[in-house]
């Protein structure tokens, strides 16, 4: 379950931000997660609760904002929205697609004290 490692990295990023911006507590974390990022949201929620225990983010609310996936279609030369990675092009039915959006995860913002 790589979501635990993701949560550990998230905690490190929050600790660095706390030092740089002089805050001591995180009460809410908003994450934007792309549909194709390979993150299992329920596993992330579980890992978040476990990893944040005893830290500046213990008890913080985790808000997940799912971002749409998109891909470039070589058949119709368009960027199209996709509901899942193996979908056909919704415009032309082509199957030669390269994902170009919704593949990452980023911290949108933190609510801090």
Image (cartoon, rainbow, N blue to C red):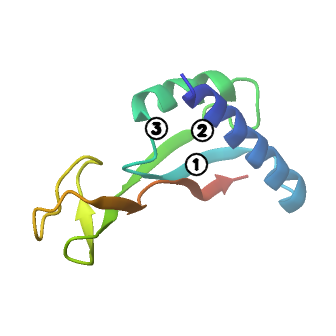
- Mark 3 Cα shell of 10 Å, populated few (<14), some (14-19), many (≥20): some
Q: Residue at x 58, y 47 (%)?
A: 28
Question: In this view of the protein, which residue sits in the foreground, 72 or 23?
Answer: 72
Q: Which one is in front in this view, the residue at disc 3 or the one at disc 2?
A: 3
Which residue lies under the disc numbered 3? 39
Image location of residue 52, percent across then percent down: 67, 29
* Relative horizontal placement of residue 102, taking residue 92 as reference (left or right): right
Which numbered marker is on residue 60?
2
Assign a secondary structure to mark 1.
strand
Question: In this view of the protein, which residue sits in the foreground, 87 or 66?
Answer: 87
Assign a secondary structure to mark 3.
loop
Asked whether the residues under the numbered discs 1 and 2 touch, taking CB atoms below 8 Å apart as contact, a structural biologist would say: yes
How far apart, in angstroms, are the residues tagged by discs 3 and 2? 20 Å
Which residue lies under the disc numbered 1? 29
Q: Residue at x 88, y 59 (%)?
A: 20
- The single residue placed furthest to the bottom in the displayed view is 77
Q: N-terminal of the two: label 1 or label 3?
A: 1
How far apart, in angstroms, are the residues tagged by discs 1 and 3? 16 Å
């Amino acid at each position: 379950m790589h979501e635990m490692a993701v949560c550990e990295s998230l905690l490190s990023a929050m600790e660095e931000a706390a030092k740089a911006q002089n805050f001591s507590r995180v009460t809410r974390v908003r994450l934007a997660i792309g549909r194709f990022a390979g993150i299992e949201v329920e596993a992330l929620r579980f890992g978040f609760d476990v990893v944040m225990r005893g830290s500046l983010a213990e008890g913080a609310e985790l808000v997940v904002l799912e971002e749409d996936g998109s891909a470039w279609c070589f058949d119709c030369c368009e960027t199209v929205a996709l509901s899942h990675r193996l979908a056909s092009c919704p415009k032309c039915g082509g199957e030669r697609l390269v994902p170009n959006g919704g593949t990452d995860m980023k911290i949108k913002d933190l609510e801090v004290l």
